[in-house]
């Protein structure tokens, strides 16, 4: 029996961040669908797991957690020696290596996430859901994201991955929004930057992430 | 000689987050002012320290870091046994206790930070800087923040601090925006909620934070 349970649909970027981490770490898990179109994430039972009424919620033995990046850190700490190691820095790299991962993971959460989420919402989700797009927001946030990716492009000219020469949680955390974004009309934000393009091709072709994308495109049975 | 150097003005919320952590951990540091009104955070020399051109930048011996929450985690890991311990969870609490801190620290970064920053910018900074306020943004983000603080109020009815019964980085990280916000017309977002009010009075009266506020209100010599 799987000790780990994830609640939420794989199409959610935050859910897919956690799934990518579980698959990298080779942790067995059970995925419990949450039908957000029916408001199941706002029911009293779900709010006991996730008080903000968002996905994912997460359980592992005695602990219940929310916030995808916090769940990923927990998985890396708890299952340190299995699957892909070093997602929070190699053990021998100590505190400094972990800090470099945290630095770029925070750059994702604080600088990349907002503009990329606005673009994903407008360009990938809105058309599927019959929602109106906001052209001003698209241009404003594309401009913001371009500036962030200019910094990334410079950094990725110095090292293969954001935090150094190894794939870490800092890279992984960009996959969910990046995947939607590269398939929209603003995909050139990634593909027009030489080092970002190389990095994106590298991280998005990892077997764990390809499994997540397959889960996203397979209708629930 | 102080091994640790922080670059940036204490009035910056991100700088003051790092200062609060340094003072809690009783780590000696040197504060180097960065005159942002003269664009000093966009100079080539500063961009070598902080490629996004934001404050703070941070140095400790051989490592240079940015992103305030990443710097705080580093300080807690590196100076684990001095000053206030347990900011990332008590050692005996292990991985699960750290995960609970991370969960609420991410709630701050992902749910509290954006609406509170918009309010601080409009209600605290704009008047001082002669900038125009955006009434729509104020109301929209006050509404968002109210929902976040409703969840906090429920949580803080169960435990003294966000992650449990001890003061942690999750609480500390709310101080910078909270301090500006409570002194604006939207301060009742905090004071009208019984448990949030009690928690705010508790965390904002800590000696380390009072020193930061004093640094913010003392003109640089």
Image (tube, coloured by chain):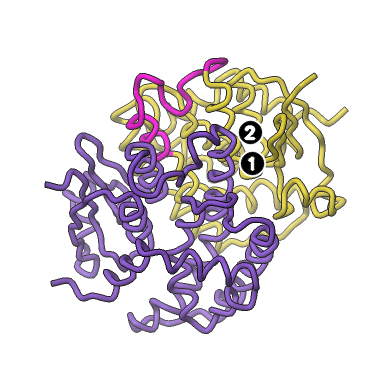
Chain colours: A purple, B yellow
Residue at (19% x, 62% y) in the render: A33
Mark 1 and mark 2 residues within 8 Å of each other at the beta carbon: yes
**In the displayed structure, would residue A117 be above or below residue A47?**
below
Residue B151 in the image: state x and y as whole percent.
34, 43
Depicted B165 relative to depicted B132: above or below: above
The residue under label 2 is B18
Where is residue A189, by image quadrant?
bottom right
In the picture, the quarter occupied by the C terminus of chain A is bottom left
Disc 1 with disc 2 on a shared chain: yes
Task: Determine whether, in the image, residue B50 is placed left or right of residue A67.
Answer: right
Mark pair 1, 2: CA separation: 7 Å
Q: Which residue is mark 1?
A: B14
Residue A47: % across, % down: 23, 48
> How many neighbours does mark 1 have within 10 angstroms: few (below 14), some (14-19), or many (20 or more)?
many
Say left or right for A202 vs A13.
right
Q: Residue at x 35, y 58 (%)?
A: A20
Magenta residues, start to end: B81-104
């Amino acid at each position: 029996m799987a000790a780990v349970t994830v609640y939420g649909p794989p199409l959610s970027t935050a859910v897919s961040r956690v799934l990518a981490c579980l698959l990298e770490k080779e942790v067995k898990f059970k995925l419990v669908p949450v039908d957000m179109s029916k408001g199941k994430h706002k029911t009293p039972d779900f709010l006991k797991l996730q008080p903000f009424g968002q996905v994912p919620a997460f359980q592992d033995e005695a602990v219940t957690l929310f916030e995808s990046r916090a769940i990923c850190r927990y998985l890396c700490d708890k299952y340190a020696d299995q699957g892909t190691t070093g997602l929070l820095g190699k053990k021998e790299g100590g505190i400094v290596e972990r800090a470099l991962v945290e630095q770029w993971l925070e750059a994702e959460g604080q600088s990349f996430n907002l503009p990329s989420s606005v673009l994903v919402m407008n360009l990938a989700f809105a058309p599927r859901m019959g929602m109106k797009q906001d052209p001003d927001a698209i241009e404003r946030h594309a401009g913001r994201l371009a500036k962030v990716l200019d910094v990334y492009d410079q950094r990725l000219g110095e090292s293969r991955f954001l935090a150094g020469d190894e794939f870490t949680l800092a890279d992984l955390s960009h996959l969910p929004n990046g995947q939607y974004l590269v398939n929209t009309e603003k995909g050139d934000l990634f593909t027009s930057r030489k080092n970002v393009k190389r990095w994106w091709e590298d991280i998005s072709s990892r077997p764990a992430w390809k499994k997540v994308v397959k889960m996203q495109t397979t209708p629930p049975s």
